Each structure stands twice: as C-alpha cells, then as structure tokens.
Amino acid sequence: MNGAESLVRTLVGGGVNVCFTNPGTSEMHFVAALDKVDGMRCVLGLFEGIVTGAADGYGRMTDKPAATLLHLGPGLGNGIANLHNAKKAASPIVNIVGEHASFHIKYDAPLTADIEGIARPVSHWVKTSPSAKTVAADGAAAIAAASAAPGQIATLILPADTAWNEADGVAAVPAIPARAKVNEARIREAADILKSGKPTLILMTGHVLLEKGLALAGAIAAKTGAKLLTQLSNKRLERGAGRVPVLRVPYVVDMAVDTLKEFQNILLVGAKPPVSFFGYPDKPSEQQAPGTVITRLAELEEDAIDALARLADLLGAKEKDAAFQAAKRPPMPTGAITLDSLAASLGALLPEGAIVVDESVTTGRGFFPLTAGAPPHDWLNNMGGSIGFGTPVGTGAAIACPTRKVICLVGDGSAMYTIQSLWTQARENLDVTTIIFANGTYQILKGELAQVGAGNPGRKAMDMLEIGRPDLNFVDMARGMGVPGRRVSSIDEFNKALQSAMQESGPKLIEVMMR
C-alpha cells in the first residue's frame, strides 16, 4: 500500500471514522485511498471553515477526533478561525494537510507556504511526515495527541510523495493516558474554603458540565451554601429538566462585576479566572471583587468529576440533596417578536435530546432562564469568539448524533461567514434547524462602540456596522443550497415554523425578522 492508504487505515483502526474534507491536487492520493478503505465517512464542505467547524462540533459531542482534509497552507489558513474556536473549546481534531511533493518545495510554486508556521498557533501538535514509511506511525501519534485530555488539535502535514510512495503498513495508536487525578491537598483546601462560611462561588467549565459533574457540584452547593456558575462560554453544557441548573457569568462587564461582587472565594473547576471579553476604558479586566481569593480545585485536563466526588465525600454532600431543575415549559407566547418571546418559544418547543448550538450573540443572551425547564438537552457555546461558528458546529454535531435534533441559533452577520454549511446539511440530509436572527446589523458592535467610548458615530462609521443595502435574504440562500426555508415576522409565525421543524426530519431554516 502507499502512504495515503496506510494513513487512512491507521485512522480507521484508531477510531477516526469521519473525515470532513475540502481537498486539492496534493491530497488526491488520500482521496483515492478513501475508496479503498471501508469505515471512513467522508463529508465535503465547500469552504475550509465549514470543515474545521464541523470537526469541532463532532468532537464536542463524541469526545473523539474526526479528521479534516485540507489543501496546503491556504486551505489550512481558510480553516483557522474555527480551529481557533476548537482549540479554545479543547475539541479533539486530527488535521491532515497536504503539501507539495518534497522535491517540489524548493521551486516556490504559487501554493508553497510555511504550513507548519500557519498550523502552530491553532495546534497542540504539528509534524510533517518525512517519508511514506513514517506516515502511518505519524498518523497514530496524531490520533494520540488529539485524544489526550482535555482534547487537542493535532496537525499532520503530508507531502504528496509521502502519500504516493510505498509504505510499510498500518500503525497502532499509542495508549491514551487517563485524566490525571487531583491531589488530596487541593481537595482538602477546597473543603476548608467551603466550610469557612465565607461567600464562595464554584466556577466551572469542561467535562464537569455533563450531568454527573453537575449533580456532584449541586450536592456540594446544597451542603455548603456555595453558588454555582459556569464560564460565559462552554464546550458543552447538559441542562434541562432533571439536571442541576446553572447560569453563566454575564458577557457585559458591569453585569459580570455585579454578579461576582458578593464572593470572597472563587473555586475554579476547569475554568479560568473570570475576565472580560475585551478591555474597555475605565473598566476592569478582572471581574471578581478586589480581595477575592481564587483557588484552583481542578485544571481543565484533570479529572474534575473525580475531584468533585472526593470533595463531596469529604463534606458529606449527597447528590440526592442537589437542587434539580423541575420540568417546566413556559406558555406559548403570542404577538410580537421580542427577546423574551423568542426565549419562551424555544422553552416551549425544545424536544428532548436537542443539541442547541448558540451563536446568537446579542439576541440569545437571555435565553437560559426560559429554557431551563425544557426536556434534557445540550447547549454548545462559541469559546473562541471567532464568528462563523454556529452552522459548521451544528453540522458536525448532527453527524455525531444523527438521532438528535440540532438547533443552530445564529445572528445574520455571523451566518454569512459560513453559510455554505447549509449545502453540506442538504447533501448529507442532516437534521439541523438553523434559526437566523435577522436584524440587518452587527448589533453587538453597536453595543461595543458605546462600551469603548468611541463617541457619537456618523454615517460613515454606522455603515461599517450595518449589513443592509441590499438586504440579505436567507430563505433564498437556503433554497439555493437545497434547504427549505421560511421567513417569520411574528412570534406566532415563529412558533408554527419551529414546531413544524421539530416534527419533521432533515435540514430547515427559519429567518426571524428582528427589524
């Protein structure tokens, strides 16, 4: 077999059985190898940002890596924004990036680039295979690197001649280390803080936000009076009826500072200390009150669920005493479209097992309270802040969980970055409902303009923040890519559109007119 086939067989043997692709000439031997090897599902994206974002969504829902196939440095470059988001989310991904044949690089052909230099900022592990004989072992090492806790990005660069030359065979993936346990001293330190009687916050993110971790955190909160919050953005939060409810640290600086001002201690469980998304004139970057003591219980890569279980035992906290969310749907709203009526409609109609991919930016900040009592569901946030996240991640989540409804909440400005996701959803017949909040503007930037104290903007400045003239039509765009769409201008119309989408399978789009 050649190097490309040895790599595909190594990937499949190592449990990587989905490849999101946008290939070019240098990857043709890899493409050909996909026909020779059973067990690899190949999903085409029409832009590399779709490919990398879909791999992020797949990794979030399966906790195992998908592969991407990208074309040289520019192809990798096109996928960087969503690799940035994936890295911040600790999503496992194996990137396969084609390179010119090793003998051709010296000629500086048009697509020649420093691929390793492009890859390093968005990768934990980078290697260029030196020969076809090493490709399989290099692929196995990439799988191991991507699979290491809490999830990493591994980028393997494959010169074309290493793909077409003869290889030695398939390589086995090295053993993946288990998550490290938190040492006993930190458990006891956390227990002492929680027993001190001082107002304490347990701030969480990562795998502890799955159902078991939340139940343990809820038990500890019930026993000690500590409060629970998550970071502003999280890789995956299991929420809804029967689960321990937890809110997020607010985005707006003043609201975050007000939320955190009461706490004298903050215990970090996977989370970072709370900081503002941006720096603003005359506003703090650190959001906790001055003098707050921040103590780390568990790093993101450590076994935080085990740490909470040991802490609960030490405190005598019982899961049965945690405050679990009651099943409660809001009444179906009527009348005008407002932020509250949208939240109520989602809360009333979310099906059990739904996966909500949230890139609603300004519109969706208040969706949590009215969706808390809906049937159990998952909520995925953009942890890297690079827009164009929602529809690709929803695409990957649907590939990972084909029996579950995926609902993408996306602003109109964000949607335009990766709108080609709809084509992939149609081609693969994915059960994704994309909800576009169309306000004809970069609404968040209007708020940021005021936050940074930039003065009163004139026409030229406002033109940089509005996306009308001409107005976008997402229903027409969706139809052009094979996805049926519907435009709604009242909450009653939205209720009907969402209810219909939840009752039918396949991709759908709802354009919500917010203006």
Image: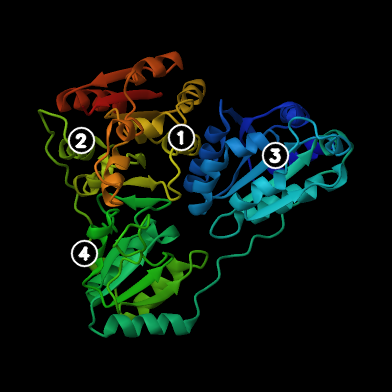
Q: In this rendering, does residue 14 appear at all?
A: no
- Give the mark nearest the N terminus, 2 or 3: 3
Using residue 35 as the reference point, say whether residue 466 is left or right of it.
left
Q: Are marks 2 and 3 in contact (CB under 8 Å)?
A: no
Using residue 93 as the reference point, say whether residue 444 is left or right of it.
left
Q: CA distance from mark 4 to mark 2?
A: 26 Å
Residue drawn at point x = 72 percent, y = 58 percent: 174
The residue pinned by badge 4 equals 258
Q: Are marks 4 and 2 in contact (CB under 8 Å)?
A: no
Other-residue count near label 2 (Cα within 10 Å), few / some / many at <14 / 14–19 / ≥20: many
Task: Residue 11 in the image: state x and y as whole percent.
Answer: 70, 43
The residue pinned by badge 2 equals 342
The residue pinned by badge 3 equals 97
- Give the mark nearest the N terminus, 4 or 1: 4
Q: Amino acid at mark 3?
A: Val
- Give the mark nearest the N terminus, 1 or 3: 3
Residue drawn at point x = 72 percent, y = 28 percent: 31
Q: CA distance from mark 2 to mark 3?
A: 42 Å
Q: In this rendering, does residue 262 appear at all?
A: yes
